[in-house]
């Protein structure tokens, strides 16, 4: 016999009602998210982040390897590598302070240019204590130098070592460094080379050179900049034109520097085809530079490239708190215009 008794609706408890409403909200949200994802997928991709498998070993302030948490940190931006040549004084460096511009200084030129980061190869006591104590300045130091005491310049002009070591200073990172020159593998080794050491020079019958400029190039690649603009990289020095900052040089020091520039220029030519194969582009913003391995680009053009997608300040923040698709957004935006 068929049961014709009508089924009574099941009455849900208050808790079950809440769970049912919550499940409906979750389902509706998933539908909205899927719709938004589909819409996003249709939009053209503006930037394709370059791959970066640079194996350079970076350490914390205690010299412990940290993996690659800093690798590609500046990608996909173009950036400036700043040398200490006197041509730097002919540039208006204020754009380096602007939002979106990244830059890495080599040695004490950080004191003359408003850069984002600093690197060195020489002993830390050669660099101003204002660099070491600056918490806004990211600093890359050879890992073996992290324990070096920081030297300070007193108001009297005299120098004295402080109780602090490099590793005690803010925003300090170590990097693995050696003096083995291998142009073909310059970007592929876990150590950043800064030239050709005595042993290799004697074995190969080639000039000995240790040059922090090479450290700067490697770090720019590691940080993810695939277009690097050189400023203050003059590769020439005389009695009237030494550095972009106040630093006397003896005749012997001038001769030694110019000899290093000559040798390094030839080594840059060795690097050029390997950089091109890796998609690592270098440009020089000094037309008179004696480093001619890479083409000239005006500083003003380089600034615009380095700014990338970041607009000039002040940033227009109107309507950013409205959700995309807000029915009042278009009316509100038009009214603001």
Image (spheres, rainbow, N blue to C red):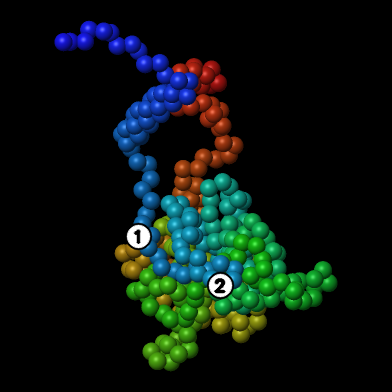
Among all residues in the image, which is located at the extreme right?
A: 156
Q: Up-down: is 317 above or below 60?
A: above
Among all residues in the image, which is located at the extreme left?
A: 1
Q: Determine the secondary structure under disc 1.
A: loop
Q: For the point 40% across and 92% down, which residue is it?
A: 203
**Where residue 266 appears, x then y in whole percent?**
41, 76
Q: Residues within 10 Å of mark 1 (few under 14, many from 20)?
A: few
Can residue 297 be seen by looking at this rendering? no
Q: Is residue 170 left or right of residue 105?
A: right
Q: For the point 44% across and 57% down, which residue is it?
A: 72
Can residue 41 be seen by looking at this rendering? yes
Q: For the point 62% across and 59% down, which residue is it?
A: 137
Q: Is residue 278 left or right of residue 80?
A: left
Front-most of 315 and 65?
A: 65
Residue occupied by mark 2: 63
Q: Determine the secondary structure under disc 2.
A: loop
- Return the disc, 1 or 2, that comes first in the chain's sequence: 2
Q: Is residue 231 left or right of residue 151?
A: left
Calculate the distance from the C-alpha at mark 1 to the C-alpha at mark 2. 31 Å
Report the number of numbered marks.
2
**Where residue 169 appears, x then y in whole percent?**
66, 66
Q: Up-down: is 278 above or below 321?
A: below
Front-most of 173 and 15?
A: 15
Front-most of 277 and 289?
A: 277
**Where residue 171 appears, x then y in whole percent?**
61, 61
């Amino acid at each position: 016999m068929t049961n014709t008794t009508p089924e009574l609706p099941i009455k849900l408890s208050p808790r079950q009602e809440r769970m049912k409403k919550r499940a409906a909200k979750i389902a509706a949200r998933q539908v909205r998210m899927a719709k938004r994802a589909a819409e996003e997928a249709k939009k053209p991709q503006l930037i394709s982040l370059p791959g970066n498998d640079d194996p350079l070993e970076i350490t914390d302030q205690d010299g412990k390897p940290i993996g690659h948490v800093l690798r590609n940190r500046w990608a996909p931006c173009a950036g400036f590598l700043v040398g200490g040549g006197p041509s730097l004084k002919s540039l208006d460096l204020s754009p380096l302070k602007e939002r979106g511009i990244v830059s890495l200084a080599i040695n004490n030129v950080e004191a003359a240019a408003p850069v984002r980061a600093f690197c060195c190869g020489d002993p830390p006591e050669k660099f101003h204590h204002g660099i070491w104590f600056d918490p806004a300045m990211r600093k890359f130091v050879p890992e073996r130098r992290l324990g070096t005491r920081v030297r300070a310049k007193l108001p009297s002009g005299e120098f004295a070592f402080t109780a602090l070591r490099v590793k005690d200073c803010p925003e300090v990172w170590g990097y693995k460094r050696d003096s083995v020159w291998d142009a073909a593998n310059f970007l592929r080794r876990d150590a950043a080379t800064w030239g050709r050491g005595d042993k290799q020079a004697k074995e190969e019958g080639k000039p000995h050179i240790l040059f922090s400029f090479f450290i700067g190039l490697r770090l720019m690649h590691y940080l993810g900049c695939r277009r690097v603009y050189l400023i203050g990289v003059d590769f020439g020095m005389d009695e009237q034109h030494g550095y972009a900052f106040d630093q006397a040089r003896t005749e012997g020091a001038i001769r030694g520097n110019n000899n290093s520039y000559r040798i390094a220029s030839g080594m840059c030519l060795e690097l050029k085809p390997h950089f091109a194969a890796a998609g690592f582009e270098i440009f020089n913003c000094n037309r008179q530079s004696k480093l001619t391995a890479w083409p000239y680009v005006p500083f003003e053009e380089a600034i615009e490239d380095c700014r990338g997608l970041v607009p000039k300040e002040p940033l227009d923040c109107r309507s950013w708190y409205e959700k995309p698709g807000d029915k009042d957004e278009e009316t509100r935006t038009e009214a603001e215009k």
